Image: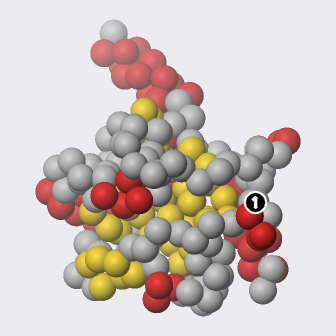
């Protein structure tokens, strides 16, 4: 019976596209572009993109991290939490993207919204083998700066000029993120 309950719980988590997040009140979220067919991520037209909110902090590994220092790269920001099933499902894809693209022209950063901060996130990061910087945001300061986060995972793609090029809530096909990143890299 316990195995059946556990199996049903795992199926329910797998079917969730996103975990509910606390809607934070702040500035209005960036204008969202319509989602294209077949699970792709629609990019905001370059002329309509808005400057991304500044992020400047120390990452979980003790190194300083800032969005400004990433200018010239395409940046993927992932708002997530350790307790969120769909967030956990996307992490292997982000690890793979970091292995394939990280460092050169692409920067990936995870922003944890876990309220227990380091004590919840550090063991999870170590156990999961996360190979990209993780920022702790238990008070949702950065989430507020990005218009509040309705659900997680919440992805923001930042173009090489530091502007928000796309926003997606929920786990989607890894190919959709990869394709959007490739399109932004092709913009030059």
- Which residue is outermost to the right? 37
Residue 130 at x, y percent in the picture: 40, 67
Q: In this rendering, would 123 be left or right of 18?
A: left
Q: Residue at 23%, 81% (x, y): give it.
A: 62
Taking depth in this image into account, of 83 and 52 the one nearest to the observer is 52
Residue 117 at x, y percent in the picture: 19, 56
Quickly name the residue at label 1. Answer: 43
Relative to residue 20, is residue 65 depicted above or below? below
Residue 108 at x, y percent in the picture: 51, 72
- Which residue is outermost to the front? 27
Mark 1 secondary-structure assignment: loop
Q: Residue at 31%, 15% (x, y): give it.
A: 2
Relative to residue 88, is residue 136 depicted above or below? below
Quadrant of the image containing the C terminus: bottom right
Is residue 123 visible in the rendered image? The answer is no
Relative to residue 47, is residue 112 depicted above or below? above
Taking depth in this image into account, of 32 and 114 the one nearest to the observer is 32
Residue 136 at x, y percent in the picture: 27, 63
Q: In this rendering, would 4 be left or right of 113?
A: right
Residue 24 lies in what quarter of the image?
A: top left
Is residue 136 visible in the rendered image? The answer is yes
**Mark 1, other Cα within 10 Å: few <14 / some 14–19 / many ≥20:** many
Quadrant of the image containing the N terminus: top left
Q: Residue at 69%, 66% (x, y): give it.
A: 49
Q: Residue at 50%, 25% (x, y): give it.
A: 11
Q: In this rendering, would 33 be left or right of 85?
A: right
Residue 119 lies in what quarter of the image?
A: bottom left
Tag count: 1
Q: In this rendering, would 31 be left or right of 15?
A: right
Relative to residue 38, is residue 70 depicted above or below? below
Identify the colour scheme used: secondary structure
């Amino acid at each position: 019976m316990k195995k059946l309950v556990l199996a049903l719980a795992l199926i329910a988590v797998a079917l969730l596209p996103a975990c509910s997040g606390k809607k934070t009140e702040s500035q209005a979220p960036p204008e969202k572009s319509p989602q294209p067919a077949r699970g792709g991520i629609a990019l905001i037209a370059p002329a309509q993109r808005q400057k991304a909110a500044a992020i400047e902090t120390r990452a979980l590994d003790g190194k300083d991290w800032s969005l400004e220092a990433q200018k010239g790269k395409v940046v993927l920001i992932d708002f997530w939490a350790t307790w969120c099933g769909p967030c956990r499902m996307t992490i292997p894809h982000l690890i793979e993207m970091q292995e394939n693209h990280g460092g050169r022209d692409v920067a990936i950063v995870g922003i944890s919204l876990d309220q227990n901060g380091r004590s919840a996130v550090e063991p999870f990061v170590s156990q999961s083998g996360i190979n990209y910087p993780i920022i702790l945001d238990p008070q949702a300061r950065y989430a507020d700066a990005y218009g509040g986060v309705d659900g997680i995972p919440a992805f923001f793609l930042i173009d090489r000029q530091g502007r928000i090029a796309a926003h997606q809530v929920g786990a989607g096909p890894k190919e959709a993120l990869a394709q959007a990143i490739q399109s932004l890299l092709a913009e030059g």
